[in-house]
Amino acid sequence: MHDGLRSLWGRLRGQLVPPEAVDGIVVGPYDDIVRTAGGFLVGLVVAYTLGRLFVVPAVTRIVAARNRNNPTIETAVATYSHVFVVLVAIAVGIASAGLWSLLTNLSIVVAAVTLVAGAASQDVVGSLVSGLFLIGDPEFNVGDWIAWPGGEGVIEEVDFRVTRVRTPNNETISVPNTQLTSNTLTRPYGRDRFRVVEPFEIAYDDDVELALRELVAAARDNDRVLDDPAPTATLAAFEDSAVRIRAEFWIDDPMDVDLVTLQSDFRRDVKARFDDVGLTLGPPSGHELSGSVAVDGASPPTGTTEDR
């Protein structure tokens, strides 16, 4: 390669400038410049071409497959991948030109700039890194319902800095990725089935077994409740003034079911059933009182004192 460039340079030099015009002029340094420039261009072009044709499309396809209907993340990945390929191509070009010392000095400069920028923008860098981790998590995808200590909702877009979530109130909020990676995430509807638990309280004088049967019947009569696993009802606890019972049943495709409407319909059905069979739903709580009561204009009984 170098011999060919040297030969080409010799022919061009002989055609453009008469030989006698350059007698006594040292042309060796120009040969070094041509070789260096040629090595840099060859390394740059080869690395950039390979990255542009293979690396960028492959990375974009992988991310797009995990984040369907999310053009924002696809565009961001393509842009960042392209910038990464350009930087790598420049480094390969410098190495191909034999300028290892320049590459070393450039690395020191880049490291210093990165250190200063990182110290000045820790939150931004943290969000970028967190975004990469979220994108690489197979359990975190667009369309999933997630809950974290700050809220809950459906993931609409996953960007490198923030994640956009649609809340139950149909609001779109931008959550910094650092909040999602530093806190516990819950995917309540992450599987094909979802268990619904509905607690109720009845009076101690009521028939507990009858109440449990009515809960199971109310769940079975709902078309949106699965037959397998079968609905169940259990006695959960004895409270101070009531017996706590609960119904448990499963629904299919929780993301396609209006869970709020389902729970409301179930509670209304339970209320109607309990009224029909004479069960007291949510009995009033009783409180034990102590002391005495003073009546205006009346003398306290003998042997007692008024509480003040």
Image (spheres, rainbow, N blue to C red):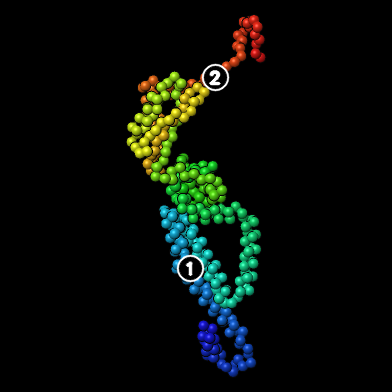
State the residue in front, 17 or 307.
307
State the residue in front, 233 or 105.
233
Residue depth check, mark 2 versus mark 1: number of the one nearer the observer: 2
- The picture quadrant where one finds residue 275 is top left
Which percent across, then down, holds residue 226? 35, 38
Residue that label 1 marks: 51
Which percent across, then down, holds residue 100? 61, 74
Residue type at numbered disc 2? His
Q: CA distance from mark 2 to mark 1?
A: 76 Å
State the residue in front, 57 or 254.
254
Residue that label 2 marks: 287
Instruction: Bin the neighbour count of mark 1 within 10 Å (Cα to Cα): few under 14, some 14-19, many 20 and up.
Output: many
Element under disc 2: loop
Which percent across, then down, holds residue 174? 52, 48
* Apparent side of residue 110 relative to residue 54 in the rendered image (left or right): right
Residue beneath the point at 46% across and 26% down: 201
Instruction: Bin the neighbour count of mark 2 within 10 Å (Cα to Cα): few under 14, some 14-19, many 20 and up.
Output: few
Residue 195: mark = none
Determine whether 62 is above or below 220 in the image: below
Q: Furthest-bottom residue in view?
A: 20
